[in-house]
């Protein structure tokens, strides 16, 4: 009897520990999510890009409409320092948060916007305003990837990249480890090889694709505040890629790979491509 009692006590203790661990894991699921679309008027390559017309609507409005379809987001706001952008978004029904013109990048603008919102959020997802065809499902998948990866502070999405675009420096590439965590991002050819020639991966990995980074940045809310206090890092400055500061400081980025053919608007010539894609999809 004593043996059974001891066994029952040990089993009860084990179950209590398991439940405590599971409860802690559930608490880290980070369920309260806000989407932020940072938008600034000034741009070296494409001034006024957020307001460029995409089949009759400003591009930032198109992006907001797509993001608002995501089911994991409790709120979607546009963060800007420009009244022209704010007015166009409000006219479309979007919530706007005015931010400082001194924000050095979209990440800092997202952080400032969230500090001005009522309510607490566990996750902040930075949605690039130049992705008018971003799929709501990709946003949801990116959020869930972070929710299901307690050791990661950031998640993002990539899609296979055609070989003819691998060397284009307007396309940001990514490589991941065997667990789906980012190892590096670059505007150059990534991965590279000793010949400097774009080609399929060697056997038995010949079906492995080059990966294009889609630009979604899904942050743990507490880490976002910490990130904005971190000083710039060497690789971040060399590549001009904000996400490298996460890796250089030893944090994990979870990457999901999705099938997404409609890329963002980097240059004026991309507008016609996006409009044609929208017509094909029956969007207006």
Image (tube, grey):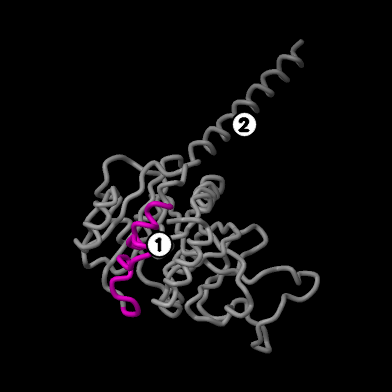
Residue range of the region highlighted in magenta in the rendering = 44-66
> What number of labels is visible?
2
Location of mark 1 (residue): 128
Q: Position of residue 253 (x, y in %)?
A: 52, 59
Q: Residue furthest top?
A: 1
Q: Residue at x 43, y 70 (%)?
A: 265
Q: Is residue 98 left or right of residue 184?
A: left
Q: Is residue 185 above or below residue 156?
A: below
Question: Residue 54 in magenta?
Answer: yes
Disc 2 element: helix
Q: Which mark is residue 217?
A: none
Specify few, some or many for label 1: CA neighbours under 10 Å numbering under 14, 14-19, or 20 or more.
Answer: many
Q: Is residue 87 left or right of residue 71?
A: left
Location of mark 2 (residue): 18
Give the position of the N terminus as an image quadrant: top right
Q: Is residue 208 above or below residue 253?
A: below
CB within 8 Å, label 1 to label 2: no
Q: Nearer the viewer, residue 94 or 190?
A: 94
Q: Residue at x 60, y 26 (%)?
A: 16
Specify few, some or many for label 2: CA neighbours under 10 Å numbering under 14, 14-19, or 20 or more.
Answer: few
Which of marks 2 and 1 precedes in the sequence?
2
Q: Position of residue 268 (x, y in %)?
A: 39, 76
């Amino acid at each position: 009897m004593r043996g059974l009692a001891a066994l029952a006590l040990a089993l009860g203790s084990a179950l209590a520990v398991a439940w405590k661990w599971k409860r802690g894991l559930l608490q880290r699921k980070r369920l309260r999510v806000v989407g932020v679309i940072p938008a600034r008027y000034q741009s070296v390559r494409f001034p006024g890009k957020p307001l460029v017309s995409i089949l009759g609507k400003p591009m930032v409005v198109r992006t907001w409409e797509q993001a608002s379809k995501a089911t994991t987001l409790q709120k979607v706001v546009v963060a800007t320092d420009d009244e022209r952008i704010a007015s166009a978004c409000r006219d479309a029904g979007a919530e706007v948060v005015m931010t400082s013109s001194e924000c050095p990048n979209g990440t800092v603008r997202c952080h400032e916007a969230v500090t001005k919102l009522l309510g607490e959020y566990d996750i902040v997802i930075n949605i690039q305003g130049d992705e008018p065809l971003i799929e709501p499902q990709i946003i949801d998948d990116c959020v869930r990837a972070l929710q299901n990866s307690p050791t990661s502070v950031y998640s993002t999405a990539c899609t296979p990249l055609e070989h003819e675009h691998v060397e284009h420096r307007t396309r940001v590439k990514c490589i991941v480890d065997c667990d789906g965590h980012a190892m590096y991002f670059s505007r150059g050819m990534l991965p590279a090889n000793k010949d400097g020639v774009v080609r399929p991966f060697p056997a038995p990995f010949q079906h492995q694709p080059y990966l294009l980074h889609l630009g979604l940045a899904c942050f743990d809310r507490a880490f976002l505040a910490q990130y904005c206090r971190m000083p710039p890092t060497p690789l971040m400055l060399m590549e001009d890629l904000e996400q490298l500061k996460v890796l250089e400081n030893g944090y994990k980025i979870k990457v999901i790979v999705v099938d997404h053919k409609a890329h963002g608007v980097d240059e004026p010539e991309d507008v016609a491509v996006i409009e044609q894609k929208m017509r094909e999809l029956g969007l207006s």
